[in-house]
Image (spheres, grey):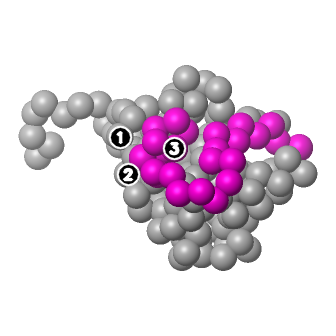
């Protein structure tokens, strides 16, 4: 099975704990990057740690969680090797993999419930990148653009 890294802030702690248990129960190796409890922490710190773990090959994919999913997705996406999609449905998670080759997803614990989060994770982990016409676009995501895009 694939190693999955998870990280959250305090608002995402309970959802992270539920997903860690689910993933371990399904036989995945899980890298729980914290936090260890619901004490207040800063999402940029945990987003960076998750991004580094995926970029360094410690995990194949990452799941980042904060209250809205927005802040931690921004933090993860600061790393040039990461393509983190904020998802609120299984369809969004599936399309993030198929079209964008997302190697991380962000979830908002105050936006979606645990069952929707489980559906997002399932689609994220079971969907392959479609490649083809999407491959060139995804390649551009990792490049620093020096020329105007158009």
* Residue 99 within the segment the image draws in magenta: no
Q: Nearer the viewer, mark 2 or mark 3?
A: 3
Q: Are marks 1 and 2 in contact (CB under 8 Å)?
A: yes
Give the class, few, some or many, for how many residues have Cα within 10 Å of label 3's Cα (few <14, many ≥20). many
Mark 1 vs mark 2, CA separation in Å: 6 Å
Q: Which residue is mark 3?
A: 46
> Which of disc 3 and disc 1 is earlier in sequence?
3
Label 1: element kind: loop
The answer to whether marks 1 and 3 mark residues whose Cβ atoms lie closer than 8 Å is no
Screen quadrant of the N terminus: top right
Q: Evaluate whether residue 75 shows in this view.
A: yes
Real-space CA distance between mark 2 and mark 3, rounded to the nearest whole angstrom: 11 Å
On screen, 74 above or below 80? below
Residue bearing the label numbered 1: 78
Q: Quadrant of residue 12?
A: bottom right
At label 1, counting other C-alpha atoms closer than 10 Å, the crowd grade (few under 14, some 14-19, many 20 or more) is some
Q: Position of residue 147 (x, y in %)?
A: 10, 33
Looking at the image, which residue is at 55% across and 23% down? Answer: 56
Residue closest to the eye, 38 or 96: 38
Q: Which residue is mark 2?
A: 74
Q: Please provide the residue range marked out in magenta.
A: 27-50
The numbered mark, 2 or 3, whose residue comes first in the sequence reads: 3
- Kindly report the distance in space between the C-alpha atoms of the residues bearing marks 1 and 3: 12 Å
């Amino acid at each position: 099975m694939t190693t999955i890294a998870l990280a959250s802030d305090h608002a995402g702690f309970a959802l992270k704990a539920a997903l860690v248990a689910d993933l371990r129960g399904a036989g995945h190796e899980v890298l729980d990057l914290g936090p260890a409890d619901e004490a207040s922490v800063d999402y940029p710190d945990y987003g960076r740690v998750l991004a580094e773990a995926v970029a360094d090959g410690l995990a194949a994919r990452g799941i980042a969680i904060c209250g809205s999913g927005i802040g931690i997705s921004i933090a993860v996406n600061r790393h040039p090797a990461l393509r983190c999609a904020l998802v609120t449905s299984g369809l969004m998670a599936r399309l993030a993999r198929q079209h964008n080759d997302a190697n991380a997803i962000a979830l908002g614990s105050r936006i979606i419930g645990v069952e929707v989060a489980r559906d997002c994770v399932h689609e994220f982990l079971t969907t392959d990148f479609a490649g083809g016409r999407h491959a060139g676009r995804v390649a551009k995501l990792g490049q620093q653009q020096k020329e105007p895009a158009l």
